[in-house]
Image (cartoon, rainbow, N blue to C red):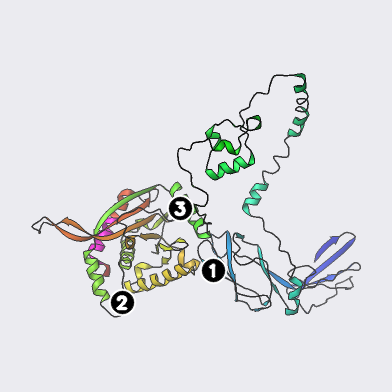
Amino acid sequence: MLTIRRGASVYRFARIAGSRLLQYGRSNARTFTGLTTRPILRPMPNWKPEKFVVWCRNYSDLPPHVIVKLPALSPTMETGTINSWEKEVGDEVEQGDVLASVETDKATMDMESNKDGFFAAILVEAGTKEVAIGQEVCILAEEKEDIAAFKDYKPTPVAKKEDTASKEPAPQPAPPTPQVAPSTPQPAPPTPQSGPPPVTPSSRTFVSPYARTVAKERGIDLQAANIQGSGAFGSIVSSDLDRIELSVAQPVVGDFEDIPHSQTRKTIARRLTESKTSIPHYYVTYDINMSTVLQLRKELNALPDVKISVNDIIIKAVANTIRLNPVVNCEWRDDMIRRHNKINISVAVDTSKGLITPVVMAADAKGLKQINLDMTTLRNKAFDGKLKPEEYQGGTFTISNLGMKGARHFTAIINPPQACILAVGTVEKRPVYCEDSEHGFKMADMMTVTMSSDHRAVDGAQAADWLQQLKSLLENPSLLLL
């Protein structure tokens, strides 16, 4: 039994038949419309049923409907961008139908309907950015003839984190009582009439609004410039700015382009800044002779329907090295070091929207051909922004390969919460020592790799030992078969 008091009226509700509610009352009863079409009346002792109500999704004067709110389409999503609507007003919607394409912080995801109905209204237009989770985005009506009732519907705004944070300090400005101050300055104006000494200049710099705008466009720091204004009471006007000689030429308006941050770029900036400032990075570098690997790749690609890349072999070698020595397959936590049993290799992929790291699951248990198929699929999905959360989460070790870009050596930033990332350079011909050569050296296909490690979880000697094992596997790729 649920009792609601409203003024002098008392409403009593009883739940029956699943989600249906019946209202019992002797006076001032109201009828609410809802989604249940066949309410069941059951009298209760000492009460005479006069009117009934049924449970509905929205208690309002509008016809039965469902308000669809933006869901969290990825674990790290805070806001999203409505790229496009896949339904138009009037379309019939079934459970599982795609309503909209939403850009999250990682990829572009489909927002599906979990109800049947008719598409009644779009509350957030396509292309809108920074749509908060939980914001009302569209409406589904139960009946098609009810669609017109939602033409002028106004969505309820959702307060963002910034808004709630800004509201907290709001009460503080209220208590101050600077309003009393005007009572003391008021006697000051009449005093000049009695002939006091001239007003002494203050440390405050007065700037006309137009001069402030011009200074901002020219990149002039008015405080640092320390110039004497020619305007009233020594204020700086626009003509004073022409007398400032800048030591560095400032860009002219129009010589630059402002590119808005995408959700992916914001996430990259936040995570990498957090990684670089909170994780104690250190770096260990090794040179690896890849001549045997290149010969193996050439032989494998001579087979029909086989196209193996050097990166595929590196992924397999890294996974097998982790299986032999799992010290790097871990993450730092406040009260422990968690070492993973599964070997899931994240591989950095550069897309037009930014960097993303799809994951080759259980890479140590897969052959080179399967790794190549997985990477081809994941790379294509990454370029199209169609990666699912389970395809870019759960990695335990990351590989970042800039060798195809011609980079000989670089250091990578750790991908949290992982403890290590391997930066792979290009394969190039270099002279190496050879005692059998009459010149004392020979040309070999060499590759430089650098592993960035979290010193809290992996010591330097451990990282060096692990890289020595990786070097051994790549210089003797037949060991990958063991």
Quarter of the figure that contains the N terminus: bottom right
476 inside magenta stretch: yes
Placement of 84 over or under 472, stated as above or below: below
Residue 434, x across and y down, in percent? 13, 57
Q: Name the residue under label 3.
A: 272
Q: Mark 2 points at which residue?
A: 306
Q: Which amino acid does label 1 sit on?
A: Met
Q: Which mark is residue 33?
A: none
At label 2, the amino acid type is Val
Instruction: Tell me if 371 is positioned left or right of 291 in this view.
Output: right
| Alpha carbon separation for disc pair 2 and 3 | 36 Å
Please rate how many residues cluster around mark 2, counting C-alpha atoms within 10 Å: few if below 14, some from 14 to 19, many from 20: some
Secondary structure of residue under mark 1: strand
Quadrant assignment, res 182: top right
Residue at 52% x, 52% y is 254
Of the image marks 1 and 3, the number of the one nearer the N terminus:
1
- Residue 109 - label: 1
| Residue 335 visible in this rendered orientation of the protein | no
Name the residue at the left extreme: 438
User: What residue appears at the point 88 percent right and 59 percent down from the top-left corner?
Assistant: 7
Q: Residue at x 72, y 77 (%)?
A: 142
Q: What stretch is highlighted in magenta?
A: 467-479
In depth, the one of 197 and 156 nearer the eye is 197
CA separation in Å, label 1 and label 2: 32 Å
